[in-house]
Amino acid sequence: PALNQRTSEGFEAWLIQMNENLAREHRQHPGAVQAPWAVNLVVHRTNPRWQTDLALCVKHRVPIVITSLGAASQVVDAVHGYGGLVFHDVTTLKHARKAAEAGLDGIIAVAAGAGGHAGTLNPFVLAHEIRSVFDGTLLLAGGLSHGEDILAAQALGADLVYMGTRFIAASESMAQDAYRHMLVDAKMDDVLLTRAFTGLDANMLIPSIQAAGLDPDNLPVREHGSVEVTTDLNPDMQHKKRWKDIWSAGHGVGGIQTVSSAKTIIDQLKAEYTSAVQG
């Protein structure tokens, strides 16, 4: 996420580091396949940085740009100009239609059960409905935690899946150790859908809300859609530690049994997927 860096200058430093690291890996292992990497760009009227950050994505030729909270045609034109791809988060069929009309390459169907900002629709219905109006790359997100979940998503018409919560607990992630261990201990019932923290529906960990001294049953009420990017999603705001001290998780959190490496998680997913295919 571009906004995980406090400034556009810091964001560009990340882009430079990413490209340099990949170039070094290619020199050392010229035969290895490198998966494309992506940047999440919040395209919202309250984000004063998005155009500057987009220009940096173009400058450093980011392979995939994922837009949230707005599907600007300006992003599509700019990224397609250097051969990149643009994917977009949606939670409704209405937004999926708009994304398709904007010429996006991929749509991420964020269903109920996704960690952090989430939709409220059943993944079966959402995937089918979007596939009926969009023939590009379709990704499904929301509660996916096992290899058999990937196979099920493919059966629904999805090409790829999003699996976020499962990898927050990976040893390589930048999450705090306390966050990782809370994920290991959590079950589906420990996840609360609330708009109290960002103005948008988001699935958050109840134990982290309680640890912050708040009552999950008596959280402040915010008008839906009242998100303000410069304060709600900016990790540098001193009075806003929501994404540091109050942590998100999806409904698939119960599938996390231990803290392990990303490779171990991927190997497990592959084994589960293969087993499901073979029946």
Image (cartoon, helix red, strand yellow):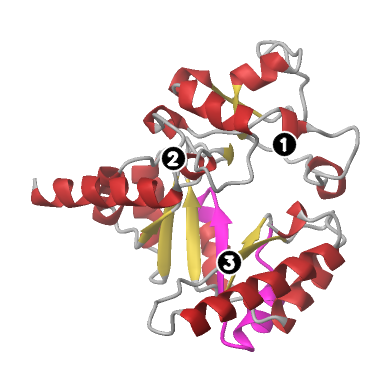
Q: Which residue range is magenta in the image?
A: 70-94
For marks 2 and 3, the one nearer the N-term is: 3
Which of marks 3 and 1 precedes in the sequence?
3
**Image quadrant containing the C terminus:** top left
Would you say residue 172 sits in the magenta stretch?
no
Please name the residue shown 18% across and 52% down the image: 274
Q: Quadrant of residue 227?
A: top right
Cα distance in 3D space between marks 1 and 3: 21 Å
Disc 2 target residue: 260
Instruction: Name the residue tied to disc 1.
Output: 243
In the image, 262: left or right of 231? left
Q: The disc labelled 3 sits on which kind of residue? A: Ala
Residue drawn 72% across and 74% down? Answer: 16
Do callouts 1 and 3 mark residues in contact (Cβ within 8 Å)?
no
Task: Report x, y in % for residue 92.
Answer: 52, 49
Residues marked 2 and 3 touching at CB (< 8 Å) = no
